[in-house]
Amino acid sequence: MARPEDNTMEDHRSTESDQSPDLSDKLNHDPKLKDFDVEGQGRRLSHSRVHHDVDSSSISESVGRQIELEADNGIKYRTCSWQKTAALLFSEYICLAMMSFPWAYSVLGLVPGLILTIFIAGVVMYTSLTIWKFCLRHPEIRDVCDIGQYLFWDSKWAWWFTAVMFLLNNIFIQGLHCVVGSEYLNTISDSGACTVVFSLIVAIISFFVSLPRTFSALSTLATFSAFFTFISVLLAMIFIGIEGHPAGYPEYGEPLVLAIPAKGTTFVSGMSAFLNISYTFIGQITLPSFIAEMKEPRDFWKSVTAVTIAEVILFSLVGSIIYVYTGSQSGYMTAPAFGSIANETYKKVSFSFMIPTLIFLGVLYASVSARFIFFNIFDGTRHKTQNTVVGWASWAGILAVLWILAWIIAEVIPFFSDLESIMSSLFDSFFGFIFWGVAYLRMRIADHGPDFYKKRGIRGWLGAIFNVSLIFMGLYFLGPGTYASVMSVVISYRDGDVGGVFTCASNAL
């Protein structure tokens, strides 16, 4: 059987047809399209140098040149092996959000829940490989905003739109971890302080952990984060199994386990559950940033394949086992599912092993955002590549602003599952589906022309249909998905399930 890297060589060829007709006039005027300078600080190569036939040797030559240009820098960025990149991916995906799967299964039913888990995993794996192939064509790409500009005909508005969505997505994720961090501190301390204070403590700690400036430096922390997350969810499953009954039993009767959704399940609750599953899988927004710091980008498929297999196994087991012991009743089921553990000691012990990921995942997204802002401000200067006072002070200042904004979001939307749903509908619609369907179409058109689906036979037709479907799936997330998310927030406030904004009320599990 052919190796994956062999199968993608056809996808790496590009022609001048991928370039918009009026692009040549823009290249000399748009600073974002400048060539690399002598220190290798430029963000992008001009299209006249990018859109050529790309083969294995040209990819290695381009990446090798970038590594060579960094040789004398005090801070080197292309330092990640595929193993280190896998560690970053594990820390991003094997995270607290998987503890929302039992709640999602309780709403959707066990069979639809498992089917959707496998389906979303497959779609994310496919689109991740599309991103990888696109980045191999353009090894100078630093982040998803560069891709956004490439995809939409080098339009400046596309770059700015992508940048805004990119930063908002990451700040919301940081905010989510402030929320969950405050939940943990309230749970472990028996609500020993104001929730606003606990949330602020998490933001301050995360700020300091965010200070390393390369992904390679964060990869060791990522490994510990993923490992302790696995221990945490393993203990949660064991403890719930040992107890036999969830917290609150027998007030709501015997735990009710359903293969299909319960009668009367609303569109809002069902869509919210689906968005929670999707949110946990969809993390493609960071992949271009990770690939940009790999010593050998062609090995990225190894990283993403290993993580996807682990995701499907772990998420399905966690969701199924905890759901079976906890049941569908809302009085028993919580998100995250640690709150369903009846024994307080068991709950605190299992939740405590989640501390590394509570901090690190927010740190990872803060680092991605800060890197994006910092590179744009100091592109082409020594502050980007050397240890200067201005460089480090600016880096710390950017991180401080990001964590302050994240803390504010955490206080305005202080609930776990609804915040996940909002992020999934608003941001995953673009960064999980729409962008990568367009990326596939742009690559195929560049390779074979506008009627590529006819020239490539059944492969062309299937590829075109599937990727157009991805675009429409993203639009569904953006439209009905956002409606369901907002309505879920309104219902949560109306029913008194959460406190007000900037509240001291305890959110302990």
Image (cartoon, rainbow, N blue to C red):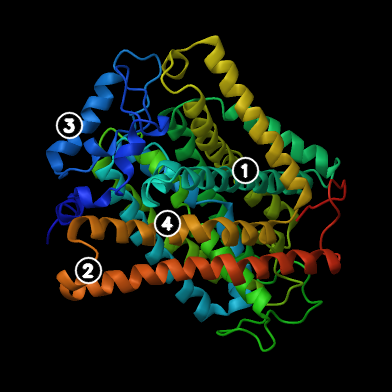
Secondary-structure class at tag 4: helix
- Closer to viewer: mark 1 or mark 2: 2
Q: Which mark is residue 435?
A: 4
Asked if labels 1 and 4 touch by Cβ distance under 8 angstroms, the answer is no
Instruction: Please tell me which of labels 2 and 4 falls first in the chain.
Output: 4
**Along the line of sight, which residue is nearer the eye, 176 or 180?**
176
Query: Within 10 angstroms of label 1, few (less than 14), some, or many (20 or more) residues?
Result: many
What whole-number distance in Å separates the C-alpha atoms at marks 2 and 4? 20 Å
Q: Tell me the residue at 53%/34% (across/down).
A: 367
* Pointer 4 or 3: first along the chain: 3
Foreground residue, 458 or 320?
Answer: 458
Q: Which residue is mark 2?
A: 451
Indicate which disc, 1 or 3, sits on the residue closer to the N terminus: 3
Question: Closer to the N terminus: mark 1 or mark 2?
Answer: 1
**Considering only vertical position in the picture, is 167 above or below 485?**
above
Q: Position of residue 313 (x, y in %)?
A: 42, 63
Q: Residue at x 21, y 28 (%)?
A: 64
* Alpha carbon distance from label 2 to label 3: 32 Å
Mark 3, Cα crowd under 10 Å, few <14 / some 14-19 / many 20+, is few
Residue at which label 1 appears: 171
Disc 1 element = helix
State which quadrant residue 360 falls in: top right
Residue at x 41% of width, y 39% of height: 289
Of circles 4 and 3, the one toward us is 4
Measure how far apart labels 1 and 2 are at the Cα level. 40 Å
Reading the image, the residue beneath label 3 is 61
Which callout, 2 or 3, points at the residue further toward the start of the chain?
A: 3
Between 381 and 238, the residue placed more toward the observer is 381
